[in-house]
Image: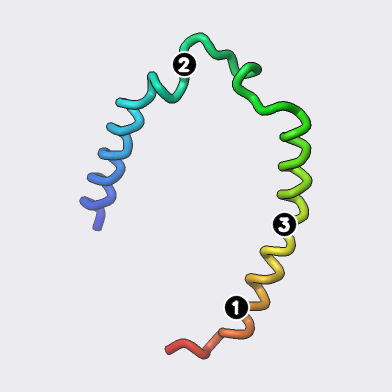
Amino acid sequence: MAAIQVIVSGAFGALVFTLFPLIVPVNVLIHQAAAPPETQKFLLISFALLVPVTLVYNTWVFRVFSGKIH
């Protein structure tokens, strides 16, 4: 199992190392690559609203189905 994890991690590392020049261009600053403030606010509000809903739903589902799968 550990050998598989090492192989997969090595392959992923090689992929990232190979694609790194294409992922982060040299002439782009972090402020230029960031999303507009309106988009960031929308995502923050959406995340803040959906995370509690997701947690409540998952808790309810786990309670409903607990002990029913063998």
Q: Earlier in the sequence, mark 1 or mark 2?
A: 2
In this rendering, position of residue 42 left or right of residue 21: right
Q: Amino acid at mark 3?
A: Leu
**Spatial separation of the CA atoms under disc 2 and disc 3:** 33 Å
Residue wearing tag 3: 50
Mark 3 residue element: helix
- Tell me where residue 18 appears, x and y as whole percent: 30, 26
Mark 1 near mark 2, Cβ–Cβ under 8 Å?
A: no
Q: Earlier in the sequence, mark 2 or mark 3?
A: 2
Residue wearing tag 2: 25
Q: Please name which of the two marks, 3 or 1, marks the residue nearer to the observer.
A: 3
Q: Please name which of the two marks, 1 or 2, marks the residue nearer to the observer.
A: 2
Residue at x 63% of width, y 17% of height: 32
Dot 1, how many residues are within 10 Å of its Cα: few (below 14), some (14-19), or many (20+)?
few
Q: Amino acid at mark 2?
A: Pro
Is residue 43 depicted above or below 31 in this figure? below
Residue wearing tag 1: 62
- Tell me where residue 27 appears, x and y as whole percent: 51, 9
Residue furthest out toward the top: 27
Mark 1 residue element: helix
Q: Quadrant location of the C terminus?
A: bottom left
Mark 2 residue element: loop
Q: Earlier in the sequence, mark 3 or mark 1?
A: 3
- The quadrant in which residue 14 appears is top left
Q: Amino acid at mark 1?
A: Phe
Q: Quadrant location of the N terminus?
A: bottom left
